[in-house]
Image (cartoon, helix red, strand yellow):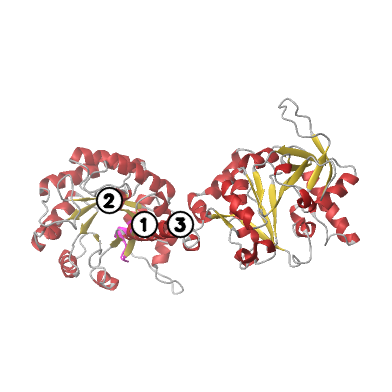
């Protein structure tokens, strides 16, 4: 039926078609692309991740390449991967995306019976269509060798009919791929097969060529004269201007293998550099961030689902990492970056802390930064500046995150490493204020060093009696403390009440002028003086603070 436009209306555009198609099923959208008067494009993908990238880029559909899927599985494109193995890959791709997928179904994985079973399974998995080629099973890639044998026309037509009779989705498309030009059988044979396959019910024809010029493809399209949709794969004649395909009414262009080939090039170069340099430093800023991978994998959706189905508490813990200092004792190692970004076995100190927090469900992480904060590139954090980092202490840095002290929160120095169980133990504490102290401090602190580390005096000393689980109270914290029972490791957890108390203490210190020069031990001592009883959780080693080059060398033993 003709569409009559009002004077204030415009002609429909490709963008309009896409808006409409977004409300259609995947199979219906592929069918609409084939029938569209505008040239459309499919991009190759070979697994769920590459399929997501194709959709994210903006392509309307995906070509699930047999060559690429086989290569990604480490086998040849000779039906060495079984149809069920391919089906498993394509199911992940379909689940990961919302755009239609056209599967490169080789020769249909056998005779008509194998093909109709394949079609039924593809329809069940939401795949929009399948393309099969008129060669013999097992197939050989079209770009290998010469004079490849073709299937009998009648047998191939029967396979097309079997597929069409077996589809459970009326919009599912069967594309018949003609290999006559590849096999050297000439244009007349290609057109003869096109007529037969179209009559057998094929929804579109894919005409293939391995010549570097497009002449025989363009000649076929002119002879065929758009009697049904034509699909092409310009892998070999890639230099042809795309408008030439429009001129002969090609419906669909498939970019057939370039994501796989690009990945191979990038992986080779990255692997080579890491092997030669024995370090990740040279490549870290040239590869995708881990956060990008997590986003592609849909981690945010999982977090939202956890909130919806697991009844996540409104008191979800956050974290504040104090990382404003340069670390002058590290000399040239921190000339261009803050101490928290020092590399430890291919990962910065801050990366390691964030990873440990994320593993325990702590996602909302604020980092108070000062010196060279422009060099902090860790994903999934909020950076809060301490502009006065050179003239203030830890308490002033914590005050920069004052707004974060409205719920349970972990507070950590940015230059420490600790084994995962230390944080896990701290997170399980129900105390309003809990600090971690190292009972084995004498093994590493003696003499004048006592004047530069935060020692703690507790209500009871450390004991190895696992039955003695009474809470240990913090009595005092400071430098060169008499009767010390341990060393504070720079890690504490505050309940919602504890966070409120710390926030109010910081406010009071700001009001009386003591905040700029204060450290976190000063904050804790004020709370103790006010009658609060922080709880101490003992560890024996299993952590490290990085203050100088010797500490950094030792850090390789902490994972």
Label 2 vs 1, first from the N-terminus: 1
Q: Which residue is mark 2?
A: 66
Foreground residue, 115 or 201? 115
The verdict on residue 465 being magenta is: no
Q: Position of residue 185 (x, y in %)?
A: 8, 59
* 85 horizontally vs 96: left or right: left
Q: Nearer the viewer, mark 2 or mark 3?
A: 3
10 Å crowding of disc 1: few (<14), some (14-19), many (20+): many
Q: Quadrant of the N terminus?
A: bottom left
Which residue sits at x=75%, y=31%?
A: 463
Q: Which residue is mark 1?
A: 61
Q: Is residue 391 visible from the viewing direction of this image? A: yes
Q: Nearer the viewer, mark 2 or mark 1?
A: 2
Q: How many angstroms separate mark 2 from mark 3 (CA)?
A: 36 Å
In the displayed orientation, state which residue is furthest to the front: 447
Label pair 2/3, CB-CB below 8 angstroms: no
Q: Which residue is mark 3?
A: 278
Foreground residue, 487 or 55? 487
Secondary structure of residue under mark 2: helix
Q: Position of residue 126 (x, y in %)?
A: 37, 45
Label pair 1/3, CB-CB below 8 angstroms: no
Q: Position of residue 49 (x, y in %)?
A: 42, 52
Q: How many angstroms separate mark 2 from mark 1 (CA)?
A: 16 Å
Label 2 vs 3, first from the N-terminus: 2
Region of the chain picked out in magenta, as a range: 32-39
Which residue sits at x=39%, y=48%?
A: 93
Vertical comparison of 439 with 19: above or below: above
Q: Position of residue 98 (x, y in %)?
A: 43, 51
- Quarter occupied by residue 348: bottom right
The verdict on residue 37 being magenta is: yes
In the displayed orientation, state which residue is furthest to the top: 467
């Amino acid at each position: 039926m003709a569409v009559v436009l009002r004077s204030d209306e415009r002609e429909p555009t490709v963008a309009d078609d896409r808006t409409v198609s977004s409300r259609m099923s995947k199979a219906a959208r592929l069918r609409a692309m084939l029938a569209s008067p505008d040239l459309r494009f499919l991009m190759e993908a070979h697994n769920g991740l590459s399929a997501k990238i194709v959709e994210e880029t903006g392509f309307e559909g995906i070509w699930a390449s047999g060559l690429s899927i086989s290569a990604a599985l480490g086998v040849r494109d000779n039906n060495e991967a079984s149809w069920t193995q391919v089906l498993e890959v394509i199911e992940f791709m379909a689940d990961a995306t919302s755009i239609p997928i056209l599967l490169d179904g080789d020769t249909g994985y056998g005779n008509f019976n194998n093909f109709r079973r394949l079609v039924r399974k593809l329809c069940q998995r939401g795949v929009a269509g399948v393309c099969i080629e008129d060669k013999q099973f097992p197939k050989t890639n079209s770009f290998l060798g010469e004079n490849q044998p073709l299937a009998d026309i009648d047998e191939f037509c029967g396979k097309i009919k079997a597929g069409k009779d077996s589809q459970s989705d009326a919009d599912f498309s069967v594309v018949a791929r003609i290999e006559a030009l590849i096999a050297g059988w000439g244009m007349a044979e290609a057109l003869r097969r096109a007529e037969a396959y179209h009559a057998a019910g094929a929804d579109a024809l894919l005409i293939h060529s391995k010549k570097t010029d497009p002449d025989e493809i363009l000649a076929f399209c002119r002879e065929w004269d758009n009697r049904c949709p034509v699909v092409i794969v310009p892998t070999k004649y890639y230099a042809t201007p795309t408008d030439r395909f429009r001129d002969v009414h090609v419906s669909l262009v498939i970019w057939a293998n370039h994501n796989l080939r690009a990945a191979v090039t990038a992986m080779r170069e990255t692997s080579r550099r890491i092997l030669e340099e024995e370090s990740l430093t040279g490549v870290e800023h040239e590869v995708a961030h881990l956060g990008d991978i997590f986003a592609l994998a849909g981690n945010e959706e999982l977090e939202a689902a956890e909130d919806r189905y697991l009844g996540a508490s409104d008191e979800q813990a956050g974290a504040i990492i104090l990382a404003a200092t340069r670390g002058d004792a590290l000399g040239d190692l921190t000339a261009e970056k803050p101490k928290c970004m020092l590399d430890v076995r291919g990962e910065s100190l801050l990366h390691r802390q964030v990873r440990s927090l994320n593993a325990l469900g702590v996602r909302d992480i604020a980092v108070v930064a000062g010196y060279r904060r422009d060099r902090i590139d860790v994903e999934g954090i909020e950076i809060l500046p301490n502009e006065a980092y050179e003239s203030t202490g830890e308490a002033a840095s914590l005050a920069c995150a004052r707004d974060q002290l409205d719920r349970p929160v972990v507070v950590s120095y940015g230059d420490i490493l600790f084994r995962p169980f230390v944080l896990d133990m701290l997170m399980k504490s129900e105390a309003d204020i809990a600090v971690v102290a190292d009972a084995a401090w004498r093994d590493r602190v003696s003499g004048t060093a006592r004047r530069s580390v935060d020692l703690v005096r507790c209500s009871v000393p450390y004991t190895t009696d696992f039955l003695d689980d009474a809470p240990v109270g913090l009595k005092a914290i400071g430098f060169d403390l008499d009767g010390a029972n341990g060393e504070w490791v720079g890690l504490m957890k505050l309940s919602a009440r504890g966070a409120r108390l710390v926030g109010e203490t910081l406010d009071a210190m700001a009001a009386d002028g003591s905040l700029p020069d204060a450290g976190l031990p000063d904050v804790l001592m004020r709370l103790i003086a006010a009658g609060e009883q922080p709880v101490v959780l003992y560890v024996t080693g299993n952590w490290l603070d990085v203050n100088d080059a010797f500490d950094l060398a030792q850090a390789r033993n902490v994972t």
